């Protein structure tokens, strides 16, 4: 009887191990195809500008070339002014994270007239604010828009990968996938897209994993 119980326990342990390994391997493979994964999106809006702070991980050499390289964590601050832009080429800003102040120089993006700056470090904090020199002389709190999401970024990667699986499977050697958070009307949603050699597919879905649009 004892021998039977021991064998049964070993079998159950093996089944659990296989299940965990299969899930972990599947998630690892899905993440492997992702050249960019965005998992935090902070936002503030004032009378003069809107500011966003995005955190995630992306390729060290970030470009859409069909080649997947090693990834690193990143942060991007973006400022968009309402009306006349008070700067010509750059903006000096201060990012306050838990009372630590980080000075930034945001460069103008010629394509959409926003000002942007990369941050090499990802911050995990509920207390982040931004100050723009010579604008309104006060700090503004950046709120995380995906704090109340029902799904995590791992859930979103899994869901998006499954929805676009036929396209990804057909382009295994060159496909690159991207997960970002986008604003749609008055809410924020997941945007997962896969880029092949000559075309791309996307799926837009909310935090409860309901598809809103898909190609």
Image (tube, grey):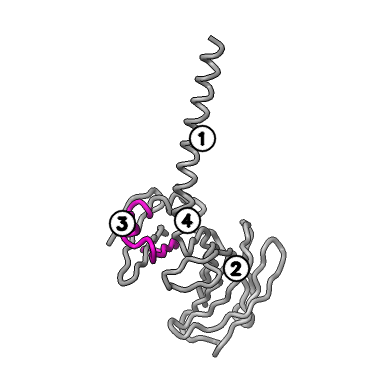
Foreground mark, 1 or 2, reads: 1
- Write the residue at 41% across / 69% down: 66
Q: Give the percent coordinates (x, y) of residue 3.
A: 55, 14
Residue 133 visible in the current orientation: yes
Q: CA distance from mark 4 to mark 1?
A: 21 Å
Q: Earlier in the sequence, mark 4 or mark 1?
A: 1
> For the residues carrying marks 3 and 4, which lies nearer the camera in this image?
4
Q: Are marks 3 and 4 in contact (CB under 8 Å)?
A: no
* Front tag of 4 and 1: 1
User: CA–CA distance between discs 1 and 3?
Assistant: 36 Å
Mark 3, residues whose alpha carbon is within 10 Å: few (<14), some, or many (≥20)? Answer: few
Q: Quadrant of residue 70?
A: bottom right
- How many C-alpha atoms fall within 10 Å of the one at disc 4: few (<14), some, or many (≥20)? some
Check disc 4 and report the residue beneath it: 31
| Label disc, if present, on residue 17 of the rendered structure | 1
Mark 3 lies on residue? 212
Outermost residue to the right: 100
Q: Which residue is mark 2?
A: 140
Which residues are drawn in magenta? 160-186
- Reply yes or no: does residue 170 show up in magenta: yes
Q: Earlier in the sequence, mark 3 or mark 4?
A: 4
Measured from the top left, where is residue 82 in percent x and y?
A: 47, 79
Comes first in the chain, label 3 or label 2: 2
Q: Do the numbered discs 3 and 2 sit on residues whose CB atoms are within 8 Å?
A: no
């Amino acid at each position: 009887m004892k021998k039977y119980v021991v064998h049964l326990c070993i079998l159950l342990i093996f089944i659990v191990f296989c299940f965990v390994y299969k899930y972990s391997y599947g998630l690892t493979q899905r993440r492997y195809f992702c050249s960019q994964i965005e998992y935090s999106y902070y936002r503030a809006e004032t009378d003069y500008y809107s500011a966003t702070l995005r955190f995630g991980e992306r390729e060290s050499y970030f470009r859409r070339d069909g080649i997947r390289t090693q990834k690193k964590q990143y942060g991007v601050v973006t400022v968009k002014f309402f009306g006349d832009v008070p700067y010509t080429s750059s903006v000096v800003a201060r990012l306050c994270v838990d009372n630590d102040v980080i000075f930034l120089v945001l460069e103008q993006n010629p394509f959409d007239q926003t000002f942007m700056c990369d941050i090499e470090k990802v911050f995990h904090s509920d207390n982040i604010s931004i100050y723009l020199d010579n604008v309104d002389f006060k700090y503004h709190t950046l709120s995380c828009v995906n704090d109340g999401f029902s799904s995590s970024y791992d859930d979103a990667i899994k869901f998006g990968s499954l929805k676009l699986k036929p396209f990804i499977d057909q382009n295994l050697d060159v496909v690159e996938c991207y997960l970002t958070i986008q604003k749609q009307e008055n809410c924020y949603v997941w945007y997962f897209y896969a880029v092949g050699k000559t075309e791309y597919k996307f799926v837009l879905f909310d935090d409860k994993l309901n598809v809103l649009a898909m190609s």
